[in-house]
């Protein structure tokens, strides 16, 4: 890699002090502090503990001291990126020895070091040092031998500022998505239960009907040929929707049984439905196939049920519990869904498909809003990756 003018290669040990302070072994057992463990840090975010603990009750790894401006670098599984820049007053704080505490020396900007830890160059070094290990971790010596490209201090500060602003945009978008998802959950529960209704539909009560009067099984078995290719779908837990498992030639598939999916079907993973693995077939999965490990359900009467409404109803814990009760077996991971039992359960639905469709419109708008925010989030993350590639290598210089 070409070294830009004014930049230099340096070992981390040359630009930071590593683990310079720890609790003494003879520390008072009554000393209280906030303990930051490895699980408290995730890609720059610190989940601050609510309560202090006493030294006598603390884990043996609660030893590292740190101060504002330091960088906490998780040395266990460093590829996960459990690093944080300490931008708060860490009074009475102690972190795990699973972190390397990096204290910048004069001429080094802590935020620049923190951002560099996420760069492709650093990740390549982590991978090389932990490859083949059952417990991928770095020791203090290995941390000190990590290399980085270091610009002058003023340029470090400007690069760190740009990348920090990018992080702030990402974090704000993530927080907004969290709020929108929470609002969507509350709205879904209100609308699919009938606790909140639209004015034009309030005159007629909801009906309580057996699920078997709404849905029935439908097995469209595909005629198998080893020379043909088939698209397979599967479904995520927690009503996460269908996903593409891949396309395979018939000769490469061991179990040569496949059911064809049509848009509007409702698919149930018989072994995973207790975890919410079910959902509607969207247009993009029309023509895909699933094995006999899935039940494919269809709408008995479109004048009675809007399948999209049932899909939202299926995202509630009450329906998940019904699926659990309709599953047979001795252990939760070995339960198998029985549609005949599920069909006997009753659900409340709006009396007209028009009201069901109105509910679908509102919830679909929520889904679309979240989807757009997630696309924006991915664009911001991609932008951050591009900025890191350009700025941390000196390919693009900043004015200082």
Image (spheres, grey):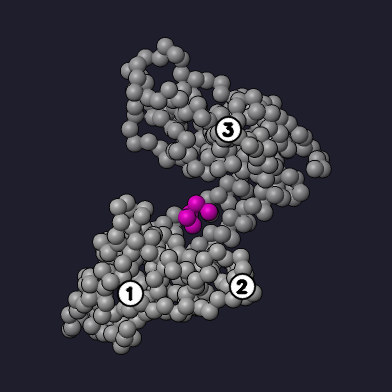
Q: CB of mark 1 within 8 Å of CB of mark 2?
A: no
Residues packed near mark 3 inside 10 Å, few (<14), some (14 to 19) or many (20 plus)? some
Circle nearer the N terminus (2, 3): 3
> Left or right: 70 with respect to 28?
right
> Left or right: 341 with respect to 282?
left
- Residue 313: x percent and y percent? 31, 70
**Element at label 2:** loop
- Looking at the picture, tell me which residue is in the foreground, 371 or 343: 343
Q: Residue 226 carries which label?
A: 2
Residues packed near mark 1 inside 10 Å, few (<14), some (14 to 19) or many (20 plus)? many
**Element at label 3:** loop
> Left or right: 31 with respect to 124?
left
Q: Would you place residue 214 above or below residue 380 in this image?
A: below
Q: Distance between the residues labelled 1 and 2?
A: 37 Å
Which quarter of the picture shows residue 148? top right
Q: Name the residue under label 3.
A: 137
Main SS of the magenta segment?
Answer: helix
Q: Mark 1 points at which residue?
A: 310
> Which quarter shows the N terminus?
top right
Which quarter of the picture shows residue 139? top right
Question: Which residue shows up at 19% across the image and 76% down it?
Answer: 208
- Residue 82: x percent and y percent? 53, 40
Q: Is residue 65 visible?
A: no
Q: Distance between the residues labelled 1 and 3?
A: 48 Å
**Element at label 1:** helix
Q: How far apart are marks 2 and 3 (CA)?
A: 46 Å
Q: Would you place residue 259 above or below residue 319 in this image?
A: below
Circle nearer the N terminus (1, 2): 2
**Which region is colored magenta?**
170-174
- Residue 317: x percent and y percent? 29, 61
């Amino acid at each position: 890699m070409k070294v830009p003018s004014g930049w230099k290669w340096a070992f981390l040990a040359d630009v930071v002090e590593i683990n310079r302070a720890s609790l003494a072994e003879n520390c008072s057992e009554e000393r209280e502090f906030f303990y930051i463990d490895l699980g408290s840090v995730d890609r720059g975010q610190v989940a601050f503990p609510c309560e202090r603990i006493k030294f006598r009750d603390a884990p043996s790894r609660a030893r590292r001291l740190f101060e504002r401006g330091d960088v906490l670098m998780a040395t266990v599984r460093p590829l996960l990126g459990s690093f944080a820049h300490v931008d708060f007053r860490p009074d009475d704080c102690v972190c795990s020895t699973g972190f390397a505490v990096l204290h910048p020396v004069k001429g080094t900007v802590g935020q620049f070091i923190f951002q560099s830890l996420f760069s492709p160059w650093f990740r390549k070094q982590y991978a090389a040092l932990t490859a083949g290990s059952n417990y991928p971790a770095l020791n203090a010596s290995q941390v000190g031998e990590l290399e980085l490209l270091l610009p002058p201090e003023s340029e470090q500060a400007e690069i760190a500022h740009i990348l920090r602003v990018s992080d702030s945009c990402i974090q704000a978008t993530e927080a907004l998505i969290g709020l929108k998802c929470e609002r969507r959950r509350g709205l879904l529960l209100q609308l699919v239960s009938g606790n909140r209704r639209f004015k034009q539909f309030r005159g007629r009560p909801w009906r309580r009907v057996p699920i078997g009067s709404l849905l029935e099984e439908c097995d469209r078995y595909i005629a198998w040929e080893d020379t043909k290719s088939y698209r397979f779908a599967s479904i995520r837990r927690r009503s996460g929707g269908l996903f593409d498992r891949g396309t395979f030639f018939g000769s490469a598939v061991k179990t040569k049984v496949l059911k064809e999916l049509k848009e509007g079907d409702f698919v149930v993973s018989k072994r995973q439905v207790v975890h919410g693995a079910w959902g509607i077939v969207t247009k993009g999965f029309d023509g895909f196939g699933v094995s006999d490990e899935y039940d494919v359900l269809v709408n008995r009467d479109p004048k009675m049920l809007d399948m999209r409404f049932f899909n939202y109803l299926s995202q509630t814990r009450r329906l998940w519990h019904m699926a659990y009760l309709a599953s047979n077996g001795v252990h939760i991971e070995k339960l198998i869904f029985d549609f005949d039992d599920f069909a006997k359960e009753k659900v409340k639905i709006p009396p007209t498909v028009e009201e069901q469709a109105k509910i679908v419109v509102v919830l679909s708008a929520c889904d679309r809003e979240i989807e757009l925010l997630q696309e924006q989030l991915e664009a911001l993350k991609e932008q951050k990756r591009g900025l890191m590639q350009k700025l941390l290598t000196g390919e693009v210089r900043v004015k200082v």
